[in-house]
Image (cartoon, grey):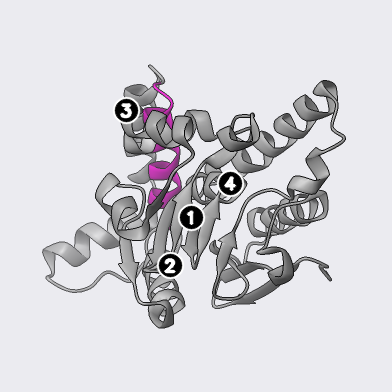
Amino acid sequence: MAYQTLQVQAQDRLMLITIHRPEKLNALNHVVMEELDLAVEEVLTREDIGGAIITGSGERAFVAGADIASFQQLSPEEARALSIKGQALFAKIERAPKPFLAAVNGFALGGGCELAMACHLRIASIQAKFGQPEINLGIIPGYGGTQRLPRLIGLTRALHLMLTGEMITAEQAQQYGLVIDVVPPAQLMEKSIALMQKLLSGPIHAIRHILHCALLAMNGSEEGYAAEAQAFSECFATADAREGIQAFLEKRKPRFQGK
């Protein structure tokens, strides 16, 4: 389908979703959120797509935050509805049975940081910066930031960022465990695509189970161990598990078929 604020490309089982509002530093507004929801749904429903990379257009910003001008006339009731809608979209990404990777090419602030955190993995350009500066507007993160940031980097560091509104560099984000790699800008997409292609060549049933069980752990669910045991057993019903075990014993690279 045609998008106004996104550039969407699908190739080799991978969908690349680029938020394209460079004149607004890719800030999130209602159109971006609605179209992002549609693009995520497309990833989830298309059998020929195994995962997605989300990035921002241009060199300055991944997503520099929400479109603040749209906040000016919000009533408390409208603000609550906006928060719930954003939380639902980012939860859809976080709970996806297919991997989502954020290729953070620049500023990831406010809603942009929340979007990156909703993805399963994050790789950052060395020029990227992360932060939840909502406190400077007299408000708080509303798309899940108060929940995900402490889980990902620890309570003390998360509170410091949210209470001061300060930004951290890509290197600090890596030290905190927020991103898995920091690369030169010219290598960001190459590294991101290579990682996703590696994942998509793996056993898709095991990947889906890992994503689900790890999310239960992040949310502090008591069901995690039981879910792990059930998922572990289900893997043994797949052809990929039989192939992986046989390949190990034969000292060769496995050829997974997604079955």
Comes first in the chain, label 2 or label 1: 1
Q: Do the residues labelled 3 and 1 touch (CB within 8 Å)?
A: no
Comes first in the chain, label 3 or label 4: 4
* Local SS, label 1: loop
Q: Disc number at residue 125?
A: none
Quadrant for the C terminus in the image = bottom left
Above or below, comparing residue 156 to residue 108 in the picture: above
Q: Nearer the viewer, residue 190 or 22?
A: 22
Comes first in the chain, label 3 or label 1: 1
Q: Name the residue under label 1.
A: 99
Q: Disc number at residue 156?
A: 3
Q: Where is residue 185 in the image (x, y as percent from the top left)?
A: 42, 77
Above or below, comparing residue 230 to residue 185 in the picture: above
Amino acid type, residue under disc 4 in the picture? Ile
Q: For marks 3 and 1, give the CA distance.
A: 28 Å
* Local SS, label 3: helix
Total marks shown come to 4
- The reply to whether the magenta stretch includes residue 215 is yes
The 10 Å Cα crowd at callout 1, few under 14, some 14 to 19, many 20 or more, is many
Q: Disc number at residue 196?
A: 2
Residue 44 vs residue 75: left or right? left
Amino acid type, residue under disc 2 in the picture? Met
